[in-house]
Image (cartoon, grey):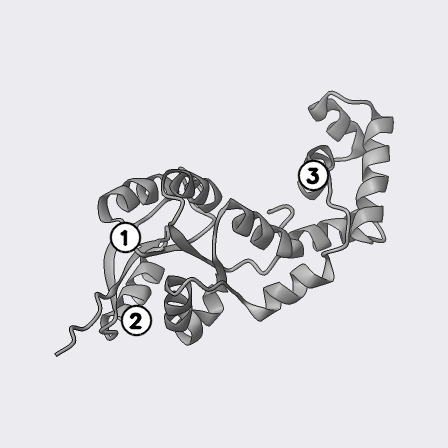
Amino acid sequence: MSRDPSPIRVLTVDDHQLIRTGIATLLLTESDIQLVGEAANGREAIAKFRECLPDVTLMDLQMPVTDGFDAILAIRGEFPEARIIVLTTYTGDVQAIRAIKAGAQAYLLKSLLYKELLQTIRAVHAGRRAIAPAIAAQIAEHSGEESLTPKETDVLRLIAAGNANKQIAAQLSITEETVKSRVKNILDKLGANDRTHAVTIAIKRGIVEL
């Protein structure tokens, strides 16, 4: 008589208790999936991963203390075979690409949690990748575009915070002419009509956060 395979051991990482409880409730009914640990931030996630050695980790990105990106990098640096699913509210392609480069195998929107989480856990455990179609479409749409440089992103972040060119120049210790040059590059690269439009695009794509 054949034995049932061991259940897929899952660690869930999210700073919202409600999300963790919802996931725990969802997993409770599945005989082939077992919740083995929970963490409320990235630093806890790293410690909990070492303790539980889960098969699959569900990772939020925006968390206090240590965010999800740094937690993914740390876990994958120590455990290269770790399989991580990002659970997020952000549909932006920039965030998704950053998470995948950090080592995530899947990127799932929290709005699809109850519909797609179980099949995504099983797919990632089996060695497959999974990216929400809305995000995959965004990645494809922007795939050939030139990315903003870190310095341009710094300027854009300050624009989003409501700073004028003079204030940006003072805060970054650069000239106003340099700021104007970077703003022009930002508008060109994002295909934006003006500064406000650039900020709107940047928030949607996950380049900056308010």
Q: Position of residue 19 (x, y in %)?
A: 35, 61
Q: Amino acid at mark 1?
A: Glu
Dot 3 lies on which element?
helix
Q: Secondary structure at mark 2?
A: helix
Reading the image, the residue beneath label 2 is: 26
Q: Are marks 3 and 1 in contact (CB under 8 Å)?
A: no
| Inter-mark Cα distance, 2 to 3 | 39 Å
Figure check: 1 above or below 144:
below
Give the mark nearer the N terminus: 3 vs 1.
1
Where in the figure is residue 27, as x and y percent of width and height? Answer: 28, 69
Crowd class of label 1 (few under 14; some 14 to 19; many from 20; radius 10 Å): many
Q: Which residue is the site of mark 1?
A: 38
Residue type highlighted by circle 2: Leu
Query: Residue drawn 77% across and 52% down?
Result: 145
For residue 150, above or below residue 4: above
Q: Residues within 10 Å of mark 3 (few under 14, many from 20)?
A: some
Q: Which mark is residue 153?
A: 3
Image spot of residue 155 (x, y percent): 73, 35
State the residue at coordinates (27%, 42%).
Answer: 50
Q: In the rendered view, does 103 fall on the left or right side of 144?
A: left
